[in-house]
Amino acid sequence: MARLMVAVVAVPGILALLYVAPPIGFYLLIAAASIVAALELFGMVAPNDKPTQLIGALITVTVSAVIWFFGKDPRVIITVLIVVPAFGLLIPLFRLGDITTAGLRSATFAFGPLYCAVPLTLLALMVRDYHPGFVILSLCLSWLSDTGGYFAGRFFGKHKLYEAVSPKKTIEGAIGGLLGATLGAVIGSLWYLKGRLLLTHAIPLALVGAALGQAGDLSESLLKRSVGVKDSGGILPGHGGILDRIDATVLTGSTVYLYLLWR
């Protein structure tokens, strides 16, 4: 019931931001989500270190803002990709803390802000520079893959996909997820992206995006298992944290954005 209530409240609000409000409105939602995602990520690797969590969130929202306002300049993108990892590795030198977790914190500072900020901000850029329907497509590739995987795994699942990381996922569920995402892409091509997404492009895009999304889901499960937590957070009742909801979308959205750049 909690999951359903979140969807009932969230979906109309997201649609309004996509199609009614100016693009900056959706970006502000994205920026807020990036901050929460960063707090969750740094909270998992440094659970008792609030300053580290806040520094991580601050770097993340800065990266997001830079991409939103200056992302069309390739010099800015290259600078972000160099500066964030390089200086991220140095931050634990000034805030050492527990030496046994210093390596993990260094890696998280180097990669975490990019992970939490860039893919989500790309969704906002789709609204501003392309069409809101591509954000819907990105979400559908993630959500319908998850839904198709759930039902296929429940009714047909027999062979484990990656038991050491996610014991409940099955190969049959993964195939069902690909089919669900493909259906969503076909609907998008024939409906809300008609004339903007060819059917011959929609199907391979769905297969690639959904496969990467499933890998993203597994990657986040691996992270949570490695630090001994069940959910990244509890901000979304019945869903867990923001990271639990965007683990696939960070890759489906990135795939769609790269498609838009290179098509």
Image (tube, rainbow, N blue to C red):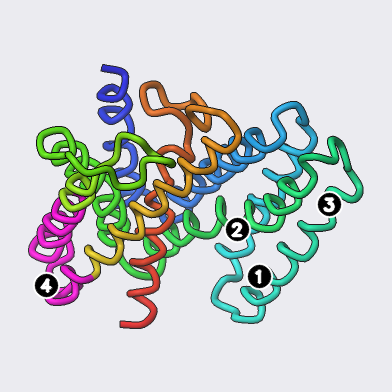
Q: Is residue 140 magenta?
A: no
Mark 3 sits on what residue?
91
> First in sequence: mark 3 or mark 4?
3
**Pointer 1 with pointer 2, Cβ within 8 A:** yes
Q: CA distance from mark 2 to mark 3?
A: 15 Å
Q: Is residue 77 above or below residue 142?
A: below
User: Circles 2 and 4: CB distance less than 8 Å?
Assistant: no
Which structural element holds mark 3?
helix
Q: Amino acid at mark 3?
A: Ile
- Residue occupying image coordinates x 80% and y 45%: 102
Residue 214 position (above or below residue 12): below
Give the distance between the C-alpha atoms of the residues marked 1 and 2, in whole angstroms. 8 Å
Highlighted range, magenta = 177-204
Please name the residue that numbered disc 2 is placed on.
114
Side of 205 where 227 appears, left or right: right
Residue of label 1: 81
Residue at 14% across / 75% down in the picture? 198
Q: Main secondary structure of the magenta part?
A: helix
- Choose the circle earlier in sequence order: 2 or 3: 3
Question: Please, what is the three-letter code of the amino acid marked with disc 4?
Answer: Leu
User: Do the residues bearing badges 3 and 1 touch, measured as CB atoms within 8 Å?
Assistant: no
Please name whichever residue, 104 or 254, is drawn nearer the observer in this view of the structure: 104
Which disc is residue 199 wearing?
4
In the displayed structure image, the side of residue 76 where residue 89 appears, left or right: right
Query: x%, y% of residue 4?
Result: 25, 24
Q: Earlier in the sequence, mark 1 or mark 4?
A: 1
Q: Quadrant of residue 1?
A: top left
Task: Where is residue 20? Give x, y as percent.
Answer: 31, 49
Q: Earlier in the sequence, mark 3 or mark 1?
A: 1
Residue with the most extreme top position: 1
